[in-house]
C-alpha cells in the first residue's frame, strides 16, 4: 500500500454535489499518511461551511476500509490550509465541464470580481456570455448565460 494506491482508490469517491468529479481531482485530499497498516487522510474543504464535509469524510473512510491490508482509517478535515481552485486537477476541470459547470481559470492568487464576467460556456465554448449573478445555488458557483447557444449555466468560482 502506497500513497499513490490510496489516491487511486479514492478516485471512486465523488463529490456529492458534483458527481462527475472525484475528491482527489477536486484537490481536497491534501495529505495521506501511512503508518504500518493504518491510514490517515486529510481533507481540505473548498469552503469552511461546506455542508458535505461529514459526508465526504464518511465516503472516504468507507471506501478505504474496503481494502484488505488496511487496518485503521482516520479521516480528518483541515481548516488551517486554504483550498484554492488551482488545486483542481486537469482531469477535475474536464469533469466539471462534463457536469455542465464552467471550470475556474488558474490565477496568481489575486482576483477581481470581473473575472466572473469572462467565463466560457461549458456547452459550446463561446466567450459570448453574461454573468447573471455572482451567487449560484452553492457558495462556490455563479450563474451565467451564453448568448450563442442560449444555455444558462453555472460557473465554478475561482478562489
Image (cartoon, rainbow, N blue to C red):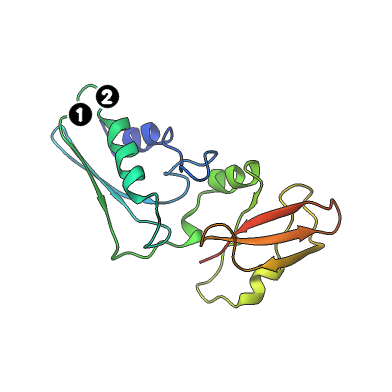
Query: What is the x, y in percent for residue 57?
Result: 30, 44
Of all residues shown, which one is farthest toward the left? 36
Q: Which structural element holds mark 1?
A: loop
Local SS, label 2: loop
* 74 to the left or right of 141: left
Query: Residue placed at 38% from the left, 61% from the top?
Result: 49
Q: Which mark is residue 48?
A: none
Q: Is residue 69 above or below residue 94?
A: above
115 over 101 or under it: above or below? below
* Residue farthest toward the top in the current orientation of the protein: 68
How many residues crowd mark 1 within 10 Å: few (<14), some (14–19), many (20+)? some
Q: Residue at x 43, y 35 (%)?
A: 11
- Return the residue nearer the eye: 24 or 136: 136
**Corner quadrant of residue 102:** bottom right
Drawn side of residue 130 relative to residue 26, left or right: right
Q: How many marks?
A: 2
Q: Nearer the viewer, residue 34 or 101?
A: 101
Residue bearing mark 2: 67
Displayed quadrant of residue 13: top left
* Residue 109 point in image, percent of width and height: 50, 73
Find residue 137 and report its horizontal and vertical position in percent.
57, 57
Instruction: Report whether 44 appears left or right of 38.
Output: right
Image mark for residue 70? 1
Residue in front for this viewpoint, 91 or 19: 19
Q: Quadrant of the N terminus?
A: top left
Q: Is residue 154 left or right of residue 109?
A: right
Amino acid at each position: 500500500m502506497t500513497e499513490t494506491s490510496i489516491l487511486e482508490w479514492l478516485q471512486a469517491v465523488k463529490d456529492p454535489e458534483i458527481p462527475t468529479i472525484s475528491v482527489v481531482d477536486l484537490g481536497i485530499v491534501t495529505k495521506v499518511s501511512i503508518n504500518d497498516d493504518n491510514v490517515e487522510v486529510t481533507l481540505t474543504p473548498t469552503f469552511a461551511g461546506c455542508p458535505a464535509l461529514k459526508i465526504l469524510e464518511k465516503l472516504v473512510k468507507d471506501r478505504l476500509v474496503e481494502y484488505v491490508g488496511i487496518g485503521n482509517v482516520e479521516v480528518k478535515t483541515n481548516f488551517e490550509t486554504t483550498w484554492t481552485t488551482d488545486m483542481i486537477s486537469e482531469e477535475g476541470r474536464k469533469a466539471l465541464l462534463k457536469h455542465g459547470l464552467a471550470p475556474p481559470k488558474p490565477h496568481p492568487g489575486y482576483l477581481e470580481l470581473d473575472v466572473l464576467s469572462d467565463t466560457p460556456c461549458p456547452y459550446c465554448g463561446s466567450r459570448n456570455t453574461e454573468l447573471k449573478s455572482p451567487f449560484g445555488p452553492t457558495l462556490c458557483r455563479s450563474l451565467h448565460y451564453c448568448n450563442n447557444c442560449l444555455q444558462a449555466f453555472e460557473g465554478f468560482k475561482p478562489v
